[in-house]
Amino acid sequence: MTTPLTIATRESRLALWQANHVKQRLEANGHSVSLMGMTTLGDQILDQPLSKIGGKGLFIKELEVALANGSAHIAVHSLKDVPMDLPEGFHLACILSREDPRDAWVSPQFDSLESLPQGAVVGTSSLRRTVLLKALRPDLQIEPLRGNLDTRLKKLDAGHYAGIVLASAGLIRLGLKDRIRHIFDRQQMIPAAGQGAIGIEISANRMDLVHTLAGLNDITTAAAVYAERGVSRAMGGSCSMPLAAHATLHESSLTLHAAWGDPLNPGAPLIHANSQTVIDLQDPDVLVTASALGVSVAQQLIAQGAVPTQRID
């Protein structure tokens, strides 16, 4: 007989979709599952960039309190919102298969970034997207855009921006694929570490749940995102780090591409680094190997002038 499970989740529509997706997967395995919706500090503070108020960890702290006090058993996150190093007492137990990791161009009027007029206003609060957009179109005016996916689309539709950049994965999961005017090439707009992947966090004193979640884990996605997160961790990555990292696995070759931009000079040339390694998905140390690839790529970035753990005041 299985033990009933409670999932802690944010209450945005996308977060609830992800939590319900995990719920359905677990129920298919015979578990009884309920959701505990929570509003996090990151959801409440919308008038400041995350880099100014404590980073993406603000989206998971309240959920971790529920894990620590036992009111929830697992927490479901967009993996790109999960800090590279979890607080002591917590464990990333499972990574589900990834949806399309690419960035999407969303605009009511313009088909692509190239079709924008000079000086057009584009919305994003991501430093990664800011430096990548400025590298492609230095003339653009980048304006802050916070809030959940529906809030961002409403601000776009209200005419505040010529277009905005969002993760394709969220739009696809919520049935909003028709809002996408263009999907950026992964070499043009390199995704964020973990973009498109769902991660499940547990309390470190409930390691028995790793076995419960094992059937949901996708080792191919896990290897790729561990490489990506390895870059970010070695760079001191957070939302104040204008860093992109994306890995792909072809047969046994794991290839990682990363880019860093100067946050104080967003129009400056990007610093790029690439590397690859051979991995065996059956190897119990495969995630260690993937993480090491990330470290080596971070070292390449730093050798070329990228600045780790840069704080933006």
Image (spheres, rainbow, N blue to C red):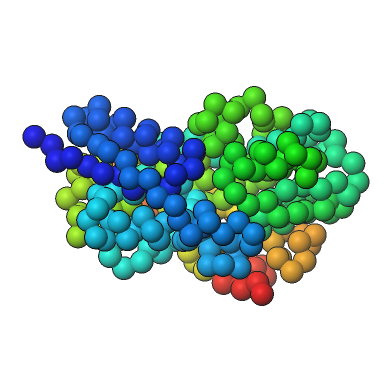
In the image, what residue occupies the spot 60% across and 65% down? 51
Query: Can the viewer see residue 189 in this picture?
Result: yes
Indicate left or right for 166 with 38 as reference: right
State the image coordinates of residue 223 (x, y, percent, origin top left).
40, 47
State the image coordinates of residue 70 (x, y, percent, origin top left).
22, 56
Report the number of discs.
Answer: 0
Q: Quadrant of residue 97?
A: top left
Towards the viewer: 249 or 230: 230
The answer to whether residue 167 is above or below residue 130 is above
In the image, what residue occupies the spot 36% across and 55% down? 63
Indicate left or right for 70 with 117 as reference: left
Q: Residue furthest left?
A: 1
In the image, what residue occupies the spot 68% across and 51% down? 145
The answer to whether residue 30 is above or below residue 93 is above
Query: Can the viewer see residue 259 in this picture?
Result: no
Indicate left or right for 121 with 209 as reference: right
The answer to whether residue 272 is above or below residue 111 is below
In the image, what residue occupies the spot 66% across and 75% down? 313
Towards the viewer: 221 or 14: 14
The answer to whether residue 235 is above or below residue 102 is below
Q: Quadrant of residue 105?
A: top right
State the image coordinates of residue 10 (x, y, percent, origin top left).
43, 47
State the image coordinates of residue 221 (x, y, percent, origin top left).
42, 41
Q: Quadrant of residue 86?
A: bottom left
